[in-house]
Amino acid sequence: MTVQARADAGAHAALELLAARPLVVLTGAGLSTDSGIPDYRGPGAPARRPMTYQEFVSGPEARQRYWARSHLGWGRMRRAEPNDGHRALAALDPELLITQNVDGLHEAAGSRRLVALHGRIADVVCLGCRATSARQALHARLDAANPGWTARHTELETRPDGDVELEDAAAIAEFTVPGCAACGGVLKPDVVFFGENVPKTRVERCYAAVEALTDGDGALLVAGSSLTVMSGLRFVKRAAQRGTPIVLVNRGETRGDPLVTHKVDAGCSEFLRALAALRAA
């Protein structure tokens, strides 16, 4: 049997396993690559070091560096559209959709039962008064405070965090970061940075959904995640501990490979389209 034939057989077996079972789905950055958002750890992806929470709160210069880059990246990311994979998952309407992505594309595609594990880049929170606001409002304030900034930096590579590759220290030093409109405090995207913990209520809801699969003869589907960080891997481990079938669709190796029932080394959109069609038949 050729390599391609084995791959096709593996995908077919995975689809058959998922055809009629209740599903919980966990998605990662690989699901959004077809929408033009690069992933962290896919084949050929460059090494990346996102800013940690500790760096962000260390002082004004770190926040200036973060927002100078993120302002440019958000201007691009907000224009991304859901792809076939997002739309297929909305049609599948799993028992729970857990996403590690912050891009909001699942919501835009119409998914209903959703936990955005790491928050949404479209929301902003004040670290002082804890008021939340829309990123679009801050985007307008940053534009007003830094006229011409976007026009001067049009050729920079977009990164998966929603920022860009900007290393010009002199330019960054000129970037003005406004404070909270309510109290003047420090503004941060309402997402979980490296070094922060996912809110306990989100984790508990996800664990409960994964554990319910055992009683309902369900399955866990992981799409587009390398499972490098424990944030998502813990749910795969919990499912494996309980004997729940697990299907993992991802290009390249992952930390979850030894735990899964079927590994499909393929693009997410193609597989999810096929699954949605099979379950709708």
Image (cartoon, rainbow, N blue to C red):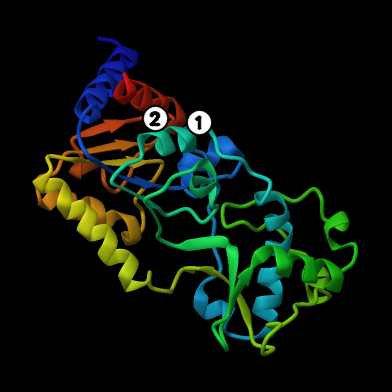
Q: Is residue 53 left or right of residue 214?
A: right
| Percent of width and height locating residue 80 | 64, 44
Q: Residue at x 83, y 69 (%)?
A: 171
Q: For the C terminus, give its image quadrant.
A: top left
Q: Name the foreground residue: 186 vs 256.
A: 186
Q: Name the foreground residue: 209 vs 234.
A: 209
Q: Are marks 1 and 2 in contact (CB under 8 Å)?
A: yes
Residue 84 circle label: 1
Residue type, label 1: Asp
Which residue carries the number 2 mark?
Answer: 272
Q: Quarter-wise, where is residue 153 in the image? A: bottom right
Element carrying mark 2: helix
Q: In the rendered view, tell whether residue 160 sits above or below residue 7.
A: below
Q: In the rendered view, tell whether residue 19 sits above or below residue 118.
A: above
Earlier-in-chain disc, 1 versus 2: 1
Element carrying mark 1: helix
| Percent of width and height locating residue 111 | 44, 45
Q: Name the foreground residue: 198 vs 257.
A: 198
Q: Residue at x 12, y 43 (%)?
A: 216
| Percent of width and height locating residue 116 | 43, 58
Q: Is residue 37 left or right of residue 239?
A: right
Q: In the rendered view, tell whether residue 128 sits above or below residue 105.
A: below
Q: For the N terminus, give its image quadrant.
A: top left
